[in-house]
Amino acid sequence: MNDTDYMKLALNLAKGTLGQTSPNPVVGAVLVKENQIIGMGAHLKAGEPHAEVHAIRMAGDKAKESTLYVTLEPCSHHGRTPPCSDLVIRTGVRKVFVATTDPNPQVAGTGIERMKKAGIEVEVGMLQQQALELNKAFFYNIQTDLPYVTLKSAASLDGKTATATGESMWITGEEARNDVHQLRHQHDGILVGVNTVIQDNPSLTTRLETGGKNPIRIVLDTHLRTPQNAKVITDFLAPTWIITGAEVDQKRVEQFTEIGIEVIKSEKQQIIIKDLLVTLGKRGITSLFVEGGSEVQGSFLKERAFQQIITYIAPKLIGGKLAPTLFGGQGIEKMAEAVLLNIKQVDMIGSDIRIIAEPK
Ligand code: NDP
Ligand code: ZN
């Protein structure tokens, strides 16, 4: 194993905890001495020890004079746990490889400075691109206070998300649906329009073989049309927030709040996506998974309010002018106004294609 191999291992440890550390980033650490791994760890959950702490504890007395490979700059502030950069110094670690600095304004280079001042050799930037990619939602959120938005949809090869009569289950195969559950597990919030709730009655929970964490369910519903017997209202498997316009019938609001469903009124009669994202950011939603339908996707597109698109394309043809396509709404008039994307990744998931793209 060389230096890069150890950092890869640290990145994999971090990757394994995606979905369980919010509002914290995922972090992995590997401690090496004389070509032997003497400790490793990952940050498992907010409030629990950071990755470096686990690795150093595992190494015990051997940690002195060792080399640390860590995917994110060791922290320098007293949060829920004492600063890791101090622990690294006290332990007598000789050299530290850091994949990327921490954009958290409370850290931002100070952890590295502290270690350097104490005489530790610090090298920053090994496998930085992978490290940034791994925590892209965290980095975006910490710099903007807004949730990192992923628009997810599934369509037939001709871009239809449902039939003309509104039937949409299922377009993609089991593997792709399982992949979606993995993504739900990794997000703080999941958002749909009220038509999807009315037509599909989805539970919007995470159903992986190994369980998984349910995101908070968020429904855009200007006039509070959500049926009281919808699964998101009755199953209590995760909190549900209904976003309405400024004016809604108070009696109807109470029918929901009485049973523990939160109704969040917008300031305007229309739900403006950018305003909503500010509200969700304030309420601690660091990442948002938007699952449709096409009207809602169209609104996020119109307001350019997204950081990533994940589209599954099934080897099926639906056809029909009236069958909804991936993005509804008004669309644009001129080709020059089209939203340009960078395709980041294309994979086969079972017999479906998964495309991950980001706006340019
Ligand atoms: P949506 O589920 O997108 O809901 C749209 C409704 O949400 C609007 O009519 C509006 O109702 C409410 N809303 C509130 N604020 C906004 C806003 N800012 N922007 C957009 N909508 C807002 O409806 P669709 O009819 O487009 O999609 C439903 C269909 O899509 C179903 O047939 C479903 O099965 C399918 N579907 C397919 C998916 C796929 O990936 N293939 C995924 C999800 C759904 P109001 O004015 O009353 O508030
Ligand atoms: Zn720390």
Image (tube, helix red, strand yellow):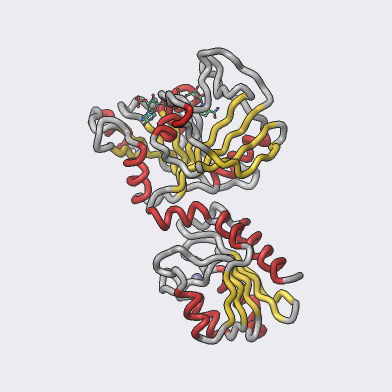
In the image, residue 54 sits, relative to residue 119, either above or below, namely above
Residue 196 vertical position relative to residue 61 in the rendered view, above or below: above
Q: Nearer the viewer, residue 211 or 198?
A: 198
The answer to whether residue 260 is seen in the rendering is: no
Out of 296 and 256, give the one closest to the viewer: 296
Residue at (52% x, 82% y) in the render = 116
Residue sitting at 48 percent across and 61 percent down?
46
**Quadrant of the rendered image containing residue 216:** top left
Q: Residue at x 70, y 37 (%)?
A: 348
Can you give x and y, in whole percent of width and height, for residue 168 in the image?
Answer: 56, 23
**How many marks do you count on the picture?**
0
Figure quarter occupied by ligand 1: top left
The image quarter in which residue 337 lies: top left
Q: Is residue 125 left or right of residue 270?
A: right
Horizontal side of residue 181 vs 222, given as left or right: right
Q: Is residue 131 visible?
A: yes
Image quadrant where one finds the N terminus: bottom right
Q: Position of residue 255 (x, y in %)?
A: 30, 31
Q: Position of residue 42 (x, y in %)?
A: 59, 65
- Tell me which corner region of the image, top left, top right, bottom left or bottom right, holds residue 142: bottom left
Q: Residue at x 52, y 53 (%)?
A: 136
Q: Nearer the viewer, residue 254 or 317?
A: 317
Image coordinates for residue 169, horizontal then vertical, percent: 58, 24
